Amino acid sequence: DGGITQSPKYLFRKEGQNVTLSCEQNLNHDAMYWYRQDPGQGLRLIYYSQIVNDFQKGDIAEGYSVSREKKESFPLTVTSAQKNPTAFYLCASSSSLDAYEQYFGPGTRLTVT
Amino acid sequence: KNEVEQSPQNLTAQEGEFITINCSYSVGISALHWLQQHPGGGIVSLFMLSSGKKKHGRLIATINIQEKHSSLHITASHPRDSAVYICAGSGGGADGLTFGKGTHLIIQP
């Protein structure tokens, strides 16, 4: 079955540590996205990539980094510079043929203490 | 910057009631998405609209381009419809969606 996988579902880290969230898709989609969700707020765009080896900052990129070495993979690193990293992180992808329609992964809930 | 405003924020109704959730969006948005998020967090895309009306089962989504307004309706609501419903706008191109804050819907038996 085609889809997006994110791992792990729950992740716990100590403050000051970098952590990398995994996102893999087998939909052959060119574009991939990372969003952050906080209680009472809409999802906000962190980074997106329209093609391999290229990515752009979204609305809240500070304290995050990404890479896009393979079409299938778009890992997100939450660095120690991110002031409030505890949140729910969602990965999504879309086809270049239909950029309007995005498919979402199941999400990773990150807790930093 | 694109903006999406959604209402109501919370909605509790009895089983069988007709449900309406509203979404207004800004000028730069050319397509409107309705998404459903269950307590586990995963998001499912329900509809994507750039004009007119779409129906899937008991769910109906409409969009009025002139008024920049979209509605999601649920007919004969059921407790399993309880979820957060999110509208999101895209401006074309693969540069991500702008999301509303979501409507937390509870359908009581």
Image (cartoon, helix red, strand yellow):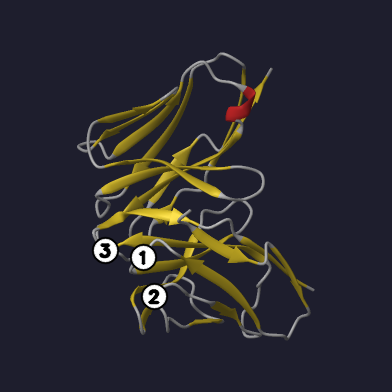
> Do badges 3 and 2 share one subunit?
yes
Residue A29 in the image, given as x and y percentages of width and height: 35, 65
- Residue B2 drawn at (x, y percent): 33, 57
Question: Marks 2/1: CA distance?
Answer: 7 Å
Circle on res. A28: 1
> Residue most toward the front?
A1
- Amino acid residing under circle 2: Lys
Chain-order first, disc 2 or disc 1: 1
**x, y percentage for residue B78?**
59, 21
Can residue B91 be seen in this snapshot? no
- Vertically, is A71 above or below A92? below
Q: Mark 3 — residue?
A: A96
Q: Mark 1 lies on which chain?
A: A
Q: Which residue of the protein is positioned furthest toward the left in this rendering?
A: B66
Q: Which secondary structure, mark 1?
A: loop
Mark 3 or mark 2: name the one nearer the start of the chain.
Answer: 2
Q: Mark 3 lies on which chain?
A: A
Residue B108 visible here: yes
Q: Where is residue A17 in the image (x, y as percent from the top left)?
A: 72, 85
SS for tag 2? loop
Query: Is A111 left or right of B92, judged from the image as shown?
Result: right
Label 3 neighbourhood size at 10 Å, few (<14), some (14-19), many (20+)?
A: some
Q: Are marks 2 and 1 in contact (CB under 8 Å)?
A: yes
Disc 3 element: loop
- For marks 3 and 2, give the CA distance: 12 Å
- From the viewer's perspective, is residue B49 above or below residue A109? above
Q: Which amino acid does label 1 sit on?
A: Asn
Q: Name the residue under label 2.
A: A71
